[in-house]
């Protein structure tokens, strides 16, 4: 049986209560309310302050202060990761705050079997995203299989792909492929430099973790793609710097280093490219719905085509600045009212939107899995294979 000490219970009871409540509200209403996040942080901070001063003045055990330091670093990194995921629109602000809270409240002993220095809560991300990705990939496979087997699937649709008229597009494809490959090479080189620089620093072990590198490259590539759309000078800069460095390796006979960079950059690009295609296919087939303007509500997330339609209408009416920006949490109440007023004459107009996905229940399940196994999904799976 699992043995929980008294201190564990002081942290886990609020974690379970808040996790259960937020999972319910996210599933039922698509919202994670700030009041529960604030209550969780207030409880955790108060408890850690009491333990800190009890340890300092009563027990006088300075060695235990290392634990408080590890909690602080872990929470800080969780904050950075949560903020980046929110900026990249991988999840909403509420999901990010809930992840940070779970990282803060989960005692570090529950990561003991797959402990990552300075960021043990990385296990929560592994236990969240890997099962989700497996489910989505399996669903995408089934959806694609049904499409291929459908009697209405016409052979001429396949012929279009090899039609000679489509061959000019090959040049454009190769151009985009080359740019993407250079982006991954650039990111990989940056990581190599960071690892070399931080080898003797406290984050050296964190940066050298393969899974952390994969996740970081995924985040950086998403951020880079986003910034390149706004900063036109960035793409030529990356291309120039990357080619210059590769030529340097070639001319100075550093062939092995060159091979390693090209090989791993290509592997990362193929893996992420396939993953993006699979998820995009699944979302297009299963996760898009049509909503009438009159039925819009807070939290709705438009598809790219619908977002362009809305922005064009707002621009024509001079209301683009009033509308503001949207994030992964979807439309605000004010934005919903503005759109309904904008299309007041056509309330039955249908707009494409993504189906909302409740992250909180899956994040809560990842915490429960971590508590029960003291490990990550990957480590647990590898142990089973052994």
Image (cartoon, rainbow, N blue to C red):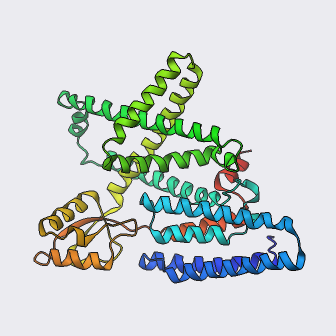
The residue located at (42%, 42%) in the rendering is 273
The residue located at (35%, 46%) in the rendering is 228
Which quarter of the figure is the C terminus placed in?
top right
Query: In the rendered view, would you say 14 is above or below 327?
Result: below
Residue in the foreground of this view, choosing between 308 and 67? 67
Q: Is residue 336 visible?
A: yes
Residue 118 position in % (x across, y down): 69, 56
Residue in the foreground of this view, choosing between 215 and 323? 323
Position of residue 104 in the picture relative to residue 167 (left or right) = right
Q: Is residue 270 visible?
A: no
| Number of numbered discs overlaid on the protein picture | 0
Residue sitting farthest toward the left: 345
The residue located at (72%, 50%) in the rendering is 384
Residue 154 position in % (x across, y down): 23, 42
Position of residue 381 in the picture relative to residue 252 (left or right) = right
Residue 178 position in % (x across, y down): 37, 31
The residue located at (55%, 60%) in the rendering is 80
């Amino acid at each position: 049986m699992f043995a929980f000490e008294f201190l564990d219970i002081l942290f886990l009871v609020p974690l379970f209560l808040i996790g259960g409540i937020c999972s319910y509200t996210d599933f039922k209403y698509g919202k994670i309310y700030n009041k529960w996040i604030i209550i969780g942080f207030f409880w955790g901070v108060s408890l850690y302050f009491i333990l800190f001063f009890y340890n300092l003045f009563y027990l006088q055990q300075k060695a235990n202060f290392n634990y408080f330091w590890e909690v602080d670093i872990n929470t800080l990194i969780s904050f950075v990761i949560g903020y980046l995921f929110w900026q990249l629109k991988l999840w909403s602000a509420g999901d990010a705050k809930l992840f940070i809270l779970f990282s803060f409240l989960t005692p570090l002993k529950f990561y003991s079997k797959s402990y990552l220095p300075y960021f043990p809560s990385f296990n929560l991300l592994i236990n969240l995203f890997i099962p989700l990705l497996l489910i989505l990939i399996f669903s995408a496979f089934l959806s694609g299989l049904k499409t291929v087997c459908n009697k209405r699937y016409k052979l001429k649709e396949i012929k279009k792909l090899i039609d000679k008229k489509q061959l000019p597009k090959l040049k454009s494809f190769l151009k985009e492929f080359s740019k993407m490959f250079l982006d991954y090479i650039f990111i990989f080189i940056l990581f190599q430099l960071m690892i070399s620089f931080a080898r003797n620093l406290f984050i050296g072990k964190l940066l050298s973790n393969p899974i952390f590198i994969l996740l970081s490259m995924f985040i950086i590539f998403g951020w880079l793609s986003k910034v390149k759309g706004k900063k036109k000078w960035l793409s030529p800069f990356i291309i120039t710097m990357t080619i210059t460095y590769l030529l340097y390796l070639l001319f100075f006979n550093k062939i092995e280093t060159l091979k390693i960079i090209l090989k791993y950059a290509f592997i990362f690009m193929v893996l992420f490219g396939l993953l993006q295609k699979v998820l995009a296919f699944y979302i297009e087939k299963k996760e898009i719905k049509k909503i009438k303007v009159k039925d819009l509500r807070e939290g709705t997330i438009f598809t790219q085509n619908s977002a362009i339609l809305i922005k064009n209408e707002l621009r024509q009416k001079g209301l683009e600045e009033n509308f503001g920006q949207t994030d992964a949490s979807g439309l605000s109440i004010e934005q919903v009212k503005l759109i309904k007023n904008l299309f007041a004459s056509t309330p039955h107009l249908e707009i494409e939107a993504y189906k909302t996905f409740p992250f909180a229940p899956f994040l809560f399940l990842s915490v429960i899995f971590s508590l029960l196994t003291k490990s990550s999904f990957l480590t647990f799976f590898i142990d089973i294979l052994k």
